[in-house]
Image: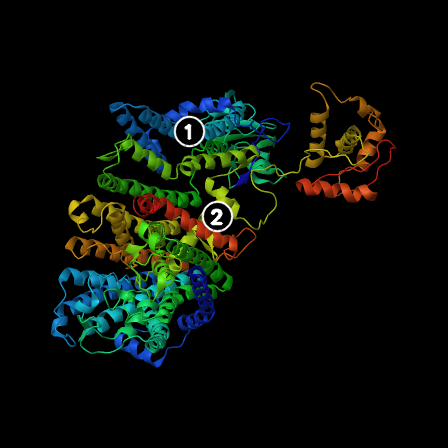
Amino acid sequence: MTPGWAAAAFITSLVVAWAIAYRFLGAYMHRAVTSPHHLRVEKLTYRAIGINPDKEQSSAGYTRSLLALSAVSIVGVFALQRLQGHLWLADGMAGVSPRVAWNTAVSFVTNTNWQTYSGESTMTHLTQMAGLAVQNFVSAAVGIAVAVALIRGFTRRASKTLGNFWVDLTRIIVRILLPLAILGAILFLAAGMVQNLTSSIDVTTLTGAQQTLTGGPVASQEIIKNLGTNGGGFYNVNSAHPFENPNFATNWLEIFVIGLIPFSLPYVFGRMAGDRRQGFAIVGAMAAIAITSIVAVNMLELNPSGTVPSAIGSSMEGRETRLGVAGSATFAAMTTLTSTGSVTSFHDSYSGLGGSVLTLNMMLGEVAPGGVGSGLYGMLILAIITVFVAGLMVGRTPEYLGKKIGPREMKLASLYFLVTPALVLTGTAAAISSPTQRSAMLNTGGHGFSEVLYAFTSASNNNGSAFAGLATDSTWWATALGLCMALGRFIPIVLVLALAGRLARQGITPQSAGTLPTSTTLFAGMVVSVTLVTVALTFLPALALGPLAEGLF
Amino acid sequence: MTTIAPPEPHAHRTSRRHKAQSKMSGRDLLAAIPGAVRKLDPRTMWRNPVMLIVEVGAAFTTILAIADPSWFSILITIWLWATVLFANAAEAVAEGRGKAQADSLRRNRQLSTAYRAIGWVAGSDIRAVVTKEVAATELAKGDIVIVKAGQAIPADGDVIEGAASIDESAITGESAPVIRESGGDRSAVTGGTRVLSDAIAIRVTQAPGAGFVDRMIALVEGANRQKTPNEIALNILLAALTLVFILVVVSIQPMAIYAKLTQGAAKDSVALTDSGLTGIVLVALLVCLIPTTIGALLSAIGIAGMDRLVQRNVLATSGRAVAAAGDVSTLLLDKTGTITFGDRQARGQRPAAGVEVEDLVACARLASLADETPEGRSIVTYVESQHLGQGDSYDLPRLRDAPGTERGDSRTARSARRCAPVDRCCFRGRVAQREPRRWGRRGGHRFLAIAGDARRGTRRR
């Protein structure tokens, strides 16, 4: 089997697995978020945090709860990192420096998981488990909760409430994330991943060198890292580390787990909207972009154009031989298409065009399929813009699922759409115009520029993968990227919840002959083109100076 | 949205339809240029942010082109100004056409005359009071006017003396005349309606320019053009896109400087030097990226849409109404609309296969001569206006050939009675099945069919 066919089989098996998950996990998640019953453990949680689970919140209340929880989380994770040297399982490690602690706290709470530190030498096992792994669950649940609130906005009729944030959060963690994580961790363990609480071991390698091996609770963190599209690795080299991603099978499993929830959420949308085809249209648009991108990265990496790769026949620089070029390329595409950011290979080493596809994946706003929850709400915003543009063509007030898209709704959708380009472009321009910040680049020319552009794109879109080759632990970089992560996460969430509140207050206009059907292939195609056109126009100039220039010349 | 037919001052209601204006001509465009230039004022442009940015960019490149003239900078500057002017011209043309429509309405308004009472005191005899003939437009609020049978009421007002039957069908759609008299709550009259009998004294209550016809004029001129919700939403989207692209263009400057810096081999060019891209290139890039086409034509499209409606004698009270019309899926009607002719009127004739137009027309007229209903009268009016030359009286050659056409012939009245207008189709045989259905499909109008075979002198109902 040639590498091309092997890659095709790899991708096809993933797509089939996701398609099955879409139907069954989707149905399960739909039951979990809409069920009127509370589990006993959930009731205990509600009593402990002191809320009435049957009292619903308005859009403003929902937003306040979410922001409050996130603020508390950031402070908590920050404090834990600073104090870790005095706590259990310290293993001789000191507290984390303030700028790295701030950057990491923001990074994990915003589901970005950008890492300016190397995990094995900076974070204690306690910080990893009680701080970072907990945030992996919570930040993922927050994303899904916002998506569910937006769906409720579409499906409720003249309602002032969007549900209860604490109930949504608890249910998503207890009923969806925890069971899946436990199941996945066992699978990972069986496939050869590490899970222990031992201190580091000094060993003599085959060549006689001394090496320190750090163990730890890897499998349990690895599963939620990918399941919750977080991406913060236990080790510095993330999923390229043999303890985090031992073999081809775990690689397949990790990629599958990354896409599992993002690809299944549109089913929940379709079921809650009362028309499964609505979910099909959304997942169809996501899949079209995702598959195209995965295939493109595979093709560009399997047919490398550089001097060295051409000479040796494959581009193996920055990749693990046990995972192969195609396995790495598919992982890279999925990790940038979702907001995961875990890596099995160094994106820095990809060909110019391959690297630009990865950057473009994130620039799309990570909507295909995107982060858990954030992908779905991002895609629904794009669907609103599509409905609006299409509605103008036929001269009717645009409607989506019976909700009229008027000036106020458009204002919120447009602002949502403005946030990320503003952060990415101003951040990149600010960094590139200052000689001091430019010195953080380890490369010059187009490639150095790509590194900066990639860093800001990754942070603003809450991806967290790094292009490498950029030293971002200076105060300026840690602060700037931390701000990009926080603003790129919470401004869109506030806008989405405000939009959901407005939509929920509306009645539902009955369908008529003039209503644009939003469950057709045509509509899915229109959503894809709106996504591509808006992004291409916005980022093409910047891409042209960096990755595209590298790839073409 | 309201369908209107402008009230006409004279008794003969002829063609109800305003002549549709011709398609856009070069002259329209020329006439619009002064308007387009006037619209360059930033205070006017402010309403259209996308084009304002183009204008600011054009002004900026002008300065740059003067400071450092080159073919490139001059050409770009000319193109940018042309873009702004074109956007304004499109809007000015659309507005100009609305104005022309308004002018024709206004002419009607000026033609109608009023009889202003001089030295009116309460209780004066209406028929004895001295009046002065003035144009309706010269009336002021508080003036007393006398309106006699057959005259149109010149302005909105209250009856202060007398009582009269008034045809208000133009406004209410009710074809039966109503009584308006002084005192009580039946004293208000509307400009444009007509007194059918008696005479009344009216105190004008609306200053000129605020009456009902004036409101129509204002609407057509687009003076009160409201933005539709869709337009507002689109403007928001355009503004957002424009903002993004401003960011794109601003941020490209440091990137370009860096790119130039790290590629020593790159030579300086008109567009790029060590200090980055020139302002002209940046402005040109921005104008290419921002949605100028939609931004430029948006208001023109709105005005043009209303203009198209006016050509069909439909008055949209606002752009909002046009947008709302797009959302209509079910239309419920309660009798006829307001501000229309409430009575059915003959508008055309469609002979069945094998029937000559002249026969049909002659027969229709004869059948309606004795019919005193609004329909009957309208048929006579229609036939006479369409088939008799100016000043020509009732003797078309073919009319005379038709049976019972001789005036004074006792058969006239008889045949007229027998040929009373009917509401429903009365053809027989296959024609009866086919023809009316075909017409019905075409227009959906009510039609009045006259049955009969004029040549054979038999008529069937």
Q: Is residue A187 left or right of residue B125?
A: left
Q: Where B87 falls versus A24 (above or below)?
A: above
Asked if residue B351 can be seen in this view, the reply is: yes
| Closest to the observer, A251 or B119 | A251
| Closest to the observer, A400 or A470 | A470
Q: Amino acid at mark 2?
A: Gly
Few, some or many residues within 10 Å of mark 2 (<14, 14–19, 20+): many
- The C terminus of chain A appears in which quarter of the rendering? top left
Q: Which residue is mark 2?
A: A391
Residue B366 circle label: none
Where's residue A536, x and y in %?
38, 46
- For disc 2, the chain is A
Asked if residue B119 can be seen in this view, the reply is: no
Q: Which residue is mark 1?
A: B86
Where's residue B330, x and y in %?
57, 51
Looking at the image, the residue that sits furthest to the top is B391
- The N terminus of chain A appears in which quarter of the rendering? bottom left
Where's residue A119, x and y in %?
21, 67
Q: Secondary structure at mark 1?
A: helix
- For disc 1, the chain is B
